[in-house]
Image: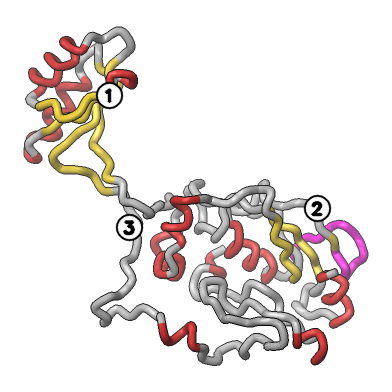
Amino acid sequence: MTGWLVPLVTVASALSLGASARAGACIVVNPVLDIGCREGQGAPAVGSTTRSETAGAPSDSSSDAVRLSSTVPRYDPQRVAVTFRTGTSRSEALRAIRLAGGTLEEAIPKLNAYLVGVEPTQRAEVLSSLRSRAAVKSAAQEVVSEALDVTPDDSAWPQQTGLRVAGFPAAWDVTEGSSRVVVAVIDTGVDGQHPDLRGALVPGYDFVNSDTNATDDHGHGTAVAGVIAARAGNHVGGAGICWRCSIMPVKVHDANGSGDDTLIAAGIV
């Protein structure tokens, strides 16, 4: 699904339903920009410049450029995380930490968890010593979490600069979406067997062939669905905007990517 990563593709099909339909419709040209369409005002043409794209657009040369979220985990060089097996007393835990060359910084007794301070140059040795003890359940580098900074593990995430600039990691820290939110993709259909979309689809309809099999035989609809809801955290492809949202495939375009206005209108209805 690399085709939907850079650049971001149009989320909605370009609908040409006549002047009366355009008067109250807003076509989403880019999923990370607020075009500002409202009733009685059509969307600007693809490629046109809008105020939203210029007034608040981040620039690498700007002193207040948007900070990009990390694409790799960070570790605290001066601390390690240790958990002990159930039944291990505090004194036993402290002795093991001391003998390993660490110092106690924080204890969470209910979890048998301890944050241990170490000299950065001795971190590997301290971890090795702790892991060798029978009472230790786990000992690992301490991961540094950053507020509002979710980092998907998908292989293509480092290339998804647009989503990071737009602030989606901050949104994902609040919610990854819900399967109860259904987004209809009115396009060429959707490939429900794509690794990044398995389990994402709800029943839809194929207006081109007049049946319920809205499988994509072109590719554009699948790409659009990926921008919206590609499953993240599966080490495959990229991350969609709403990881857990459901997709309803509504096929109104044929294998050549074209479709009648009437079929598009039926799909919307």
- Residue occupying image coordinates x 72% and y 66%: 185
**Label 2 residue SS:** loop
Number of marks drawn: 3
Q: Which mark is residue 70?
A: 3
Give the side of residue 211 with respect to residue 140, left or right.
right
Question: Could you give the CA–CA distance between mark 3 and mark 1, rounded to whole angstroms?
Answer: 28 Å
- Work out whether mark 2 precedes mark 3 in sequence or the reverse, and give the earlier one: 3
Give above or below for 26 relative to 197. Answer: below
Of 108 and 194, the residue lying toward us = 108
Three-letter amino acid code at the position of disc 3: Ser
Residue drawn at x 33%, y 21% as measured from the top left: 111
Please say if 47 is above or below 148.
below
Q: Secondary structure at mark 3?
A: loop
Give the structural element (helix, strand or loop) at label 1. Answer: strand
Q: CA distance from mark 2 to mark 1?
A: 47 Å
Q: Main secondary structure of the magenta part?
A: loop
Identify which residue is drawn at 91% across, 60% down: 211
Which residue is the site of mark 1?
Answer: 108
